[in-house]
Image (cartoon, rainbow, N blue to C red):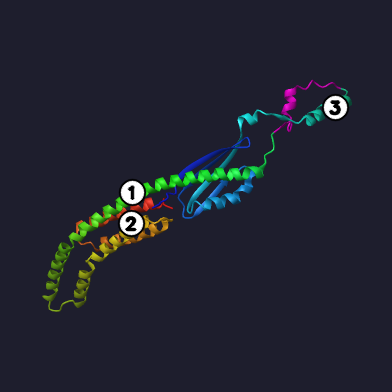
């Protein structure tokens, strides 16, 4: 049984050719799989392959994937200077002095270094980096899945606990059915006796009372609730995406609980239906976070 929560965070770092690459993945609940990438402009080409890679691990959820690349400190200490550009700058200053007939202030080495392009960063071999970047992404995805599984197990325990509480309310109400039916039968018989005593009994009302007697039997609703609970338990054991199926079952249980409440003819059954609906709503809140 592998239940995956849709809320998780994971990251992975990798030192690649003098660059510190970091993947960060944040996942929240969503009806479908919705991916958002934040990549350095030079590595936008990675997104297409990365999308397919994410889809092989995750089926539902809104994921934000952030890739940052920073120069390693040792690599950053290696300064590359464009000496040809410096020579051109010095030559340009000499030319300006010649034509302007004015002697320019001496240009310090620091000012030359500030000129755009004088300090050069080593070129990034993007094709060489791509496989290792995807390996780092794979590591982050595995950590994300592990985190989602861990939280999913906790969600499953909470759902099972709520299901057992609902079963307890159902069992208690089922034990009271003979008492409830007896009480309702007495009320209906008394009412029908009043109708029979009239000179012209209201046949339509009499038929309505008989129909009401049948309607007040809540056995079918309780049985269907138990059936849905059995299906929830079975679904929790499946090794696949189960969030949508569980949500459908929760809706069906809520419908039966509403019917139970509308049929209720005594305060205890009404209270039981309210408690069941509260528990079902708690289950639905947990289900919204399951893949």
Residue 188, horizontal then vertical, whole percent: 15, 69
Quarter of the image where one finds residue 137: top right
- Label 2, label 3: how far apart the Cα atoms are: 85 Å
Residue 283, horizontal then vertical, whole percent: 34, 52
Horizontal side of 190 relative to 83 (left or right) equals left
* Residue 269 visible to an observer of this rendering: no
Horizontal side of 35 relative to 236 (left or right) equals right
Quarter of the image where one finds residue 71: top right
* Residue 188 visible to an observer of this rendering: yes
Q: State the SS at label 1.
A: helix
Q: How many numbered marks appear? A: 3
Quarter of the image where one finds residue 86: top right
Residue 247, horizontal then vertical, whole percent: 39, 57
- Label 1, label 2: how far apart the Cα atoms are: 12 Å
- Look at discs 2 and 3 and give the one toward the viewer: 2
| Depth check, front residue: 58 or 262 | 58
Circle 2 packing at 10 Å, graded few (<14), some (14-19), many (20+), is some
- Look at discs 1 and 2 and give the one toward the viewer: 2
Horizontal side of 102 relative to 31 (left or right) equals right
Which of the two labelled residues, at mark 2 and mark 3, occupies the earlier sequence position?
Answer: 3
Q: What stretch is highlighted in magenta?
A: 102-120
Q: Could you say which disc has been placed on residue 233 in the image? A: 2
Q: In this view, does 147 lie above or below 256?
A: above
Asked if residue 39 lies in the magenta stretch, the reply is: no
Q: Mark 1 points at which residue?
A: 158
Q: State the SS at label 3.
A: helix
Q: Which residue lies furthest to the bottom in this view?
A: 200
């Amino acid at each position: 049984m592998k239940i995956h929560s849709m809320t998780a965070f994971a990251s992975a770092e990798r030192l690649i050719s003098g660059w510190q690459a970091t993947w960060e993945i944040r996942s929240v609940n969503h009806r479908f799989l919705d991916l958002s990438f934040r990549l350095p402009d030079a590595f936008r080409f990675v997104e297409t392959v990365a999308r397919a890679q994410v889809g092989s691990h995750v089926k539902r959820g809104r994921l934000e994937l952030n890739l940052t690349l920073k120069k390693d400190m040792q690599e950053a200490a290696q300064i590359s200077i464009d000496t040809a550009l410096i020579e051109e700058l010095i030559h340009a200053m000499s030319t300006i002095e010649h034509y302007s007939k004015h002697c320019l202030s001496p240009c310090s080495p620091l000012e030359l270094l500030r000129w755009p392009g004088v300090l050069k960063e080593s070129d990034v071999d993007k094709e060489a980096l791509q496989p290792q970047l995807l390996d780092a992404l794979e590591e982050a995805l595995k950590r994300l899945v592990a985190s989602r599984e861990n939280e999913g197990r906790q969600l499953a325990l909470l759902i099972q606990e709520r299901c057992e509480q609902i079963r307890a309310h159902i069992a208690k109400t089922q034990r009271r059915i003979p008492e409830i039916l007896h009480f309702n039968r007495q009320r209906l018989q008394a009412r029908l006796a009043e109708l029979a005593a009239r000179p012209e009994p209201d046949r339509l009302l009499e038929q309505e009372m008989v129909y009401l007697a049948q309607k007040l039997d809540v056995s079918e609703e309780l049985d269907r609730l138990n059936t849905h609970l059995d299906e929830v338990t079975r679904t929790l054991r499946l090794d696949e995406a189960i969030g949508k199926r569980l949500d459908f079952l929760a809706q069906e249980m809520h419908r039966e609980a509403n019917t139970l409440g509308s049929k209720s003819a005594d305060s205890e059954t009404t209270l039981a239906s309210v408690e069941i609906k509260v528990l079902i709503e708690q289950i639905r809140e947990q289900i919204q976070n399951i893949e």
